[in-house]
Structure formats: structure tokens, C-alpha cells
Image (cartoon, grey):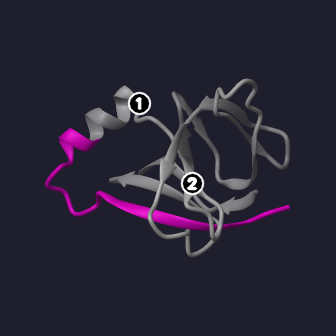
Amino acid sequence: MRANVPFNFSVGNKTLPAGVYDIRDISSSGANTLLVHEREGQSSMIVGSNTGEALKGADKTKLIFNRYGSQYFLAEIWVGGATLGRELPKTSREKELAKELASDSTQRRVEVVASLY
């Protein structure tokens, strides 16, 4: 899939700049490994993921980010119509921020619409 992410965000322990990203499955033997690659070729990250499941198919192809203050963390990846998606495990930094900002109104989920290519 491809998405234009309008803000810097973290994947695993790496912060990636805003930009257009291609995300693809590079799994072998059920490892659920994803490649997150900036179209300009400047930034990329390989990250493990878990299978997420929903009762109803996703309303659109999208990336979901957890936002804490001004920091964004890639959390989920869904393809429109699919009931199975990808969930990225929270890093220790994300867990720390979630705890620190638990009562802060800037903590929320942000969707970025993506497309299949």
C-alpha cells in the first residue's frame, strides 16, 4: 500500500520523516514482517507485526497512528474490506508516553488514508 503521511512518526525505535511511504509484507514462513519505505528512498524500516482481527471489514485502506502530544507512532495497518490487519507492538517509549499523558487530551488515534498499488 502507499500513503502520504503528513507528519514525522515512529516505527519500532526509529523516527521517520513525513512523506509518501510504501508499505509491504516481506514475511517469510509466517513472520509477519513489514517494510516501511519512503518513496524518495531516504528512510525505511523493517518491523515485525501481529495479526489484528475485526468483526467487520475495514471501511477503507488506512494507517492508524497513536498520537501522544506531538509524537505519532504507527499502530495499525488495514486494507479496505479486510477483517484481518496488522498491529505493531508498542515500543517502550510509546508505553512511557501513554502512561505520562494518560489524562492529556492530546492522546488520540489518527487515521491516514492509503491506497493499494
Residue 39 vs residue 30, the one in the foreground? 30
Residue at the far bottom: name it.
Answer: 59
Total labels: the figure holds: 2
Three-letter amino acid code of the residue under disc 2: Leu
Residue drawn at x 45%, y 35% as measured from the top left: 89
Q: Is residue 107 above or below residue 45?
A: below
Q: Position of residue 78 (x, y in %)?
A: 59, 59
- The quadrant holding residue 103 is bottom left
Q: Is residue 9 above or below residue 117?
A: above
Q: What is the magenta range?
A: 98-117
Query: SS class of the residue under badge 1?
Result: loop
**With 56 as the anchor, is 94 left or right in this view?**
left
Three-letter amino acid code of the residue under disc 1: Thr
Residue 107 lies within the magenta run: yes
Q: Is residue 57 above or below residue 49?
A: below
How many other residues sit within 10 Å of disc 2, few (<14), some (14-19) or many (≥20)?
A: some
- The quadrant holding residue 104 is bottom left
Say the numbered circle drawn on residue 91.
Answer: 1
Quadrant in which the N terminus appears: bottom right
Residue drawn at x 71%, y 55% as measured from the top left: 19
**With 52 as the anchor, is 107 left or right in this view?**
left
The residue labelled by disc 2 is: 84
Residue 70 seen in the current view: no
Q: Are marks 1 and 2 in contact (CB under 8 Å)?
A: no
Residue drawn at x 65%, y 26% as measured from the top left: 31
Q: CA distance from mark 1 to mark 2?
A: 22 Å
Quadrant in which the C terminus appears: bottom right
Q: Is residue 96 above or below residue 115?
A: above
- The quadrant holding residue 20 is bottom right
Q: Position of residue 24 (x, y in %)?
A: 76, 44
Residue 103 seen in the current view: yes
Residue 85 vs residue 48, the one in the foreground? 85
